[in-house]
């Protein structure tokens, strides 16, 4: 039995530090009596369903979006079904092994995996505070390291290419709106016509946590949005709708599909809604807007989050160095 376990662990390690690992395993496992896990039909535990439902209700009351709630439900239900035990019996080792197996089976990114860890931390932290469990098994799960890659904004040339490929006024109004306001795609699809004040070129956005904020249109985006809305014959209150009758409100996947198609037509990679948000933030920062004001436009709670979005122009940094360091 010990030899079989060691063989499996060695395969798991895939050739790293094999000699030392093997010696350590023999030494440690010699102190234990090990038996193979029973694979007979087990009783399916469903005791967690009620508490999961209560947790999701509380998160909805706190203002979490339906999309976020769906992700909570997916990852928590998947984990609880896999572990198949009452929440009060789940240990840190259970969660650690589940995350490791999930990573290997599904080959997901570190960012995706760390988001799952955060979901677990939120759930078990809440269970602990409310007295359902005596200790939080997710408290010891360290943040998953991710490779930090610079996510490039769209260049001025990229933006112009995308504009020229728009054959529909709706699509042109869409990309100008995304670039001007820097809204999230989930915020965009929730907007109605009444949320736009064309006289002051303001937009009222309902962001994460049901927080309301104001963002702004440029003269160009305002003009194209007006032309698009004036061309519509439907009575839907939504700001952006589909082309075919009954002209339903555009969904997140619908917006992503439009941008993906424009990206293919122009040969520009990774054209998606969030890239317009990052492009807007980077450009206004490089043109001198204080980062505290950029933070307010984007609707961020923390300044650190804003910094992730903004790629500072190196030429601006060089110019500022010469300006402030000159005698």
Image (tube, helix red, strand yellow):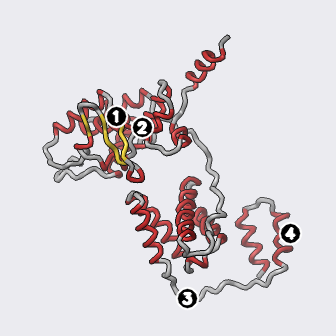
Tell me the crowding category of disc 2: few under 14, some 14 to 19, or many 20 or more residues within 10 angstroms, Cα based.
Answer: some
* Residue placed most toward the observer, 131 or 199: 131
Q: Which residue is mark 2?
A: 297
The residue at the far front in this view is 130
Q: Is residue 266 visible?
A: yes
Which circle, 3 or 1, is nearer the viewer? Answer: 1
The answer to whether the residues at label 2 and label 4 have Cβ atoms under 8 Å apart is: no
Q: Against 282, is 128 above or below? A: below
| Earlier-in-chain disc, 1 versus 2 | 1
* Residue placed most toward the observer, 177 or 12: 177
Q: Position of residue 158 (x, y in %)?
A: 41, 31
Q: Describe the element under mark 3 as helix, strand or loop.
A: loop
Quarter containing the C terminus: top right
- C-alpha separation, residue under disc 4 versus residue under disc 1: 65 Å
Tell me the crowding category of disc 3: few under 14, some 14 to 19, or many 20 or more residues within 10 angstroms, Cα based.
Answer: few
Asked whether, in this view, residue 184 is left or right of residue 43, the answer is left
* Residue placed most toward the observer, 217 or 28: 217
The answer to whether the residues at label 1 and label 2 have Cβ atoms under 8 Å apart is: yes
Q: Describe the element under mark 1 as helix, strand or loop.
A: strand
Q: Which residue is mark 4?
A: 23
| Earlier-in-chain disc, 2 versus 4 | 4
Q: Which residue is mark 3?
A: 41
Q: Which residue is mark 1?
A: 216
- C-alpha separation, residue under disc 3 versus residue under disc 2: 55 Å
Q: Give the quadrant of residue 196.
A: top left
- C-alpha separation, residue under disc 2 versus residue under disc 4: 58 Å
Q: Give the quadrant of residue 140.
A: bottom right
Q: Is residue 256 visible?
A: no
Q: Residue at x 61, y 66 (%)?
A: 138
Q: Residue at x 75, y 78 (%)?
A: 4
The answer to whether the residues at label 3 and label 4 have Cβ atoms under 8 Å apart is: no
């Amino acid at each position: 039995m010990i030899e079989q376990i060691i063989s499996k662990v060695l395969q798991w390690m895939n050739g790293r530090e094999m000699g030392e690992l093997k010696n350590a395993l023999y030494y440690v496992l010699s102190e234990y009596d090990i038996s193979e896990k029973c694979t007979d039909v087990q009783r399916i535990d469903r005791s967690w369903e009620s508490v999961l439902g209560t947790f999701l209700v509380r998160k909805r009351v706190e203002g979490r979006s339906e999309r976020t709630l769906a992700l909570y439900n997916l990852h928590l239900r998947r984990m609880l079904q896999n572990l198949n035990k009452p929440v009060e019996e789940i240990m840190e080792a259970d969660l650690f092994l589940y995350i490791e197996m999930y990573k290997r089976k599904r080959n997901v990114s570190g960012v995706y995996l760390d988001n799952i860890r955060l979901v677990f931390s939120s759930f078990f932290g809440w269970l602990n505070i409310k007295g359902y469990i005596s200790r939080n098994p997710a408290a010891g799960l360290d943040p998953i390291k991710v490779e930090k890659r610079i996510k490039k904004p769209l260049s001025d040339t990229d933006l112009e290419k995308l504009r020229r490929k728009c054959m529909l006024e709706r699509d042109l109004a869409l990309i100008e709106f995304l670039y001007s306001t820097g809204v999230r795609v989930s915020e965009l699809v929730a907007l109605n016509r009444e949320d736009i004040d064309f006289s002051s070129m303001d937009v009222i956005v309902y962001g994460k946590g049901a927080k309301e904020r104001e963002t702004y249109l440029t003269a160009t985006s305002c003009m194209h949005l007006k032309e698009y809305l004036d061309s519509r014959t439907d009575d839907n209150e939504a700001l952006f709708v589909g082309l075919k009758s009954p002209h339903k409100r555009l969904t997140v996947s619908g917006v992503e599909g439009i941008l993906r198609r424009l990206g293919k037509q122009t040969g520009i990679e990774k054209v998606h809604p969030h890239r317009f948000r990052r492009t807007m933030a980077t450009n206004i920062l490089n043109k001198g807007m204080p980062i505290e004001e950029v933070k307010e436009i984007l609707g961020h709670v923390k300044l650190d989050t804003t910094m992730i979005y903004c790629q500072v122009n190196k030429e601006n940094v060089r110019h500022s160095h010469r300006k402030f360091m000159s005698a």
